[in-house]
Image: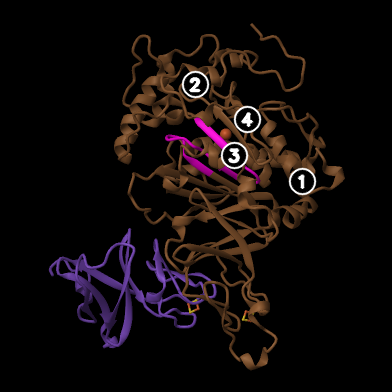
Amino acid sequence: MSENPFEHNLLTHKLCKIADHDELPQGKTQVAAVNGREVLLCHTAEGYFAVDNLCSHAAARLCDGKLKGHRVLCPMHGGSFDVRDGVALSRPATAPIRTYQLLVNEQGIFVSLPDEAT
Amino acid sequence: MTKTVDPSPGAARASGPSIADTLARDAIAPPAPILQSQYEFLGDDDIPVERYTSHAYMQREMNELWPRVWQWVCREEHIPDVGDTYVYDIGRHSVVVVRSAQDTVQAFHNVCTHRGTRLFEREGCGYSGGFTCPFHGWSWHLDGSIDTIPGRWDFPHATEQTHALRPVRCDTWGGFVFVNLDNAAAPLERQLDVLPQHFAHFPLERRRIKLHVQKRLPANWKAAQEAFMEAYHNFATHDAPNGGNTQYDIFGKFVSRFIHNIGSYSPQSLEDYPGDKWRRPALTEQEQLQMLSVFGLSSDCVPEGDTARNVAAAELRRRLGEALGTDLSGVSECMMLDSIEYHLFPNMFLFPGVNVPMVYRFRPDGDRVDHCLFDLLLLEMLPEGTPHPVPPEPVFLDVDDSYTQVQALGWLAPVYDQDTDNLMLQQKGLSSAAKSGVTLGNYQEARIRRMHMTLNEYITPPESQP
Ligand code: FES
Ligand code: FES
Ligand SMILES: [Fe+2]
């Protein structure tokens, strides 16, 4: 993985494979359990993004919602988030959700987690 | 040179060939509804300026027009799956449309039946397994029936009859979802009138949204849409020769139309316009083809004896047919090229054209009398058997944003910018109330008058009768 953009982070971050390449069609999401937390992988027209699976409002699981463009829609109260930066886009959700850096290559899609999360 | 002026008002027309003359000369005849023509003189009194500037009039519209009229909310492909929702705001009213079962679309007031909280804050697409109010957590099934009332012991008086979500009338036509907040309103078909018949040859449900732009405009919603109901302004505003002989049709209270040619024009129709432009000398066929270069035509030469209109239509049939995977070889010049614009009262525009395929909607921006929201869709034919793709999210443009920020608008962007500049000036002028009324041409601006006459049937303050 010589072209790993997170190489400089490797001491403090670790990479976990969460999906195979080409596994997830564009417009869809998929949950992966990584170190006890649920990460939502989102395949948008702009590429792959990963966010926390729990809504920042009342912890509904975003995987039960829907991806529209670069917005993930919470199934509970109409909250939504930009999956590119986690920013809350509509009430009642106001706090952002966490985002994760991804590495995408032929071997698969890897999420970069800080080591303290292990 | 001037045609004999018919003394009866509204009977006069521009000199020179009419749209019907052009269509009769075209190689392929357009579908029958395009050849229909219907006009009658509707009066020539001024339209009171207060309709565009008065908060009181705006309130009457909010109370008497918008809650009683069918209006388009979204496309069916916005809500393909059970649980998909679309929130639509009109002034202070808000409606949520939901696909509650595979073949059922329902609509509800976007309001909690407990203490009135908005259920969804934001207009547009959503998705939900049911509806939950963020305040105390009451919830409803997708069909509006009560799911949970936390602490139900305290609400013996809240029943399905009293506290289900408040339904809103909902219907579909041509792939569009319409709602009417008046549960006693006449059915949608009454308002659509001739539209289903006029669009039988152009099935709108077999179109996809290629682009959706929503822009805030600096004018009352009626002033804004009226700028799109006539092509009389083409000469002065857009520096274009082809608005002079536009055909205007009024098909009843709710539906009107204009047709103006693209790729041909009438120099005689401009005979009393200032200057000699496009009259002395008239444009050659070659020059007219050059004006169509905005369509990205590769042909730049009109063969001897042929017309720009023919050459352009032939190339577009080939090119768009290939791009869309559809055979367009039998499509008339008119359907390929012309700007054919239907208006459905109160605020929807539909263009049955292959190269000019827009849909517009104008509505008040919240409770602001001098601003409005303009939704602009470009539709594209869906080839036979192709399912609807996910529609694109709207691109938002604020008052000062130029349409040129949206690359996909191409040649249309500067045209719309010119219209916006006028609207800002017009709203300013109307607000200064130098004159108490707006004057309309008997023929070219008759669609605007028809719109106001129908508006009168909803809102009837005697002092505002045009
Ligand atoms: S839990 Fe997501 S909006 Fe309430
Ligand atoms: S206001 Fe909606 S649950 Fe109380
Ligand atoms: Fe215009």
User: Where is mark 3, residue-wise?
Assistant: B194
Q: Nearer the viewer, mark 4 or mark 3?
A: 3
Mark earlier in primary sequence (4, 3): 3
Q: Amino acid at mark 1?
A: Glu
User: Where is mark 2, residue-wise?
Assistant: B23
Cα distance, mark 4 to mark 3?
A: 12 Å
Cα distance, mark 1 to mark 3?
A: 20 Å
Q: Is residue B354 magenta?
A: yes
Give neighbour class at mark 4: few <14, some 14-19, many 20+ (Cα, 10 Å). many
Q: Amino acid at mark 3?
A: Val
Cα distance, mark 1 to mark 4?
A: 20 Å
Chain of the residue that carries numbered disc 4 in the rendered image: B
Chain of the residue that carries numbered disc 3 in the rendered image: B
User: Where is mark 1, residue-wise?
Assistant: B457
Q: Are marks 1 and 3 on the same chain?
A: yes
Q: Are marks 1 and 4 in contact (CB under 8 Å)?
A: no
